[in-house]
Image: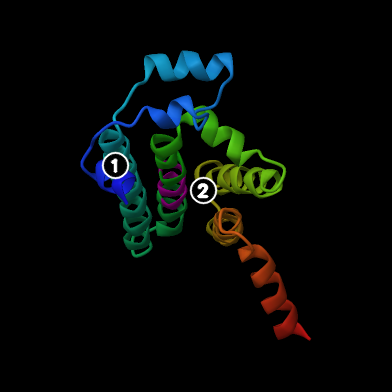
Amino acid sequence: MDKLRSFFNGEEDNADEQNGIMAQSKVDFAVSDTMKLSKTTRIKGFIICFIIGILLSILGSFALFLNNGLTYYGVLYTLGNLISIASTCFLMGPINQIKKMFAPTRVIATVIVFFAFGLTLWAALKLHNAGLALLFIIIQYLAMLWYSLSYIPYARDAVKKTVEACIT
């Protein structure tokens, strides 16, 4: 409880770094030496980026009512998701975030998410094909859901069992 209280009061606790919570590779030391942010600054950065990401996604929904709005929706929705994912770099650091994203349990989900981002932007910006953009937006949504569930213990197993029960 004391650690939680000191965390929200903005007091630094360097014991975590000494106990090995921070990654120990040479690259991580170089990054952590140049980017020392306090815990409150990291939380504020996360919240600001996450809110911007959500707002871009919501703004994209309003773009649906414009002429050729599905294209704008695809771009804004994708940018919102990218910024939301990037916001977690404030919490755990960019290198640690990349390591977690490409961990064996979620590497396929991560690749599919980024592939769906690319396909959505390609369909919206290059092809100007609203139907294809909509298909890739749906794939992107499902991929982001599956990727997000990978951070919750046993969540993907629960979803698999639920879908299996509904199908059979």
- Residue for point 24% across, 34% down: 11
Which badge, 1 or 2, comes first in the chain's sequence?
Answer: 1
Horizontal side of 107 relative to 118 (left or right) equals right
Q: Is residue 108 above or below residue 37?
A: below
Q: Amino acid at mark 1?
A: Phe
**Residue at the extreme right of the image, as rendered:** 168
Magenta span includes 126: no
In this figure, which residue is indicated by the disc labeled 1?
7
Range covered by the magenta-colored residues: 77-83
Q: Position of residue 61 (x, y in %)?
A: 37, 62
User: Distance of mark 1 from mark 2, alpha carbons?
Assistant: 43 Å
Q: Nearer the viewer, residue 10 or 44?
A: 10
Q: Position of residue 98 (x, y in %)?
A: 57, 33
Dot 2: element: helix
Q: Nearer the viewer, residue 149 or 118?
A: 149
Q: Are marks 1 and 2 in contact (CB under 8 Å)?
A: no
- Residue for point 38% across, 62% down: 64
Magenta span includes 78: yes
Q: Is residue 66 above or below residue 4?
A: below
Q: Which image quadrant is residue 35 in? A: top left
- Residue for point 31% across, 53% down: 55
Q: Amino acid at mark 2?
A: Ala
Picture quarter with the C terminus: bottom right
**What number is the disc on residue 167?**
none
**What number is the disc on residue 124?**
2
Q: Residues within 10 Å of mark 2 (few under 14, many from 20)?
A: many
Q: How many numbered marks are there?
A: 2
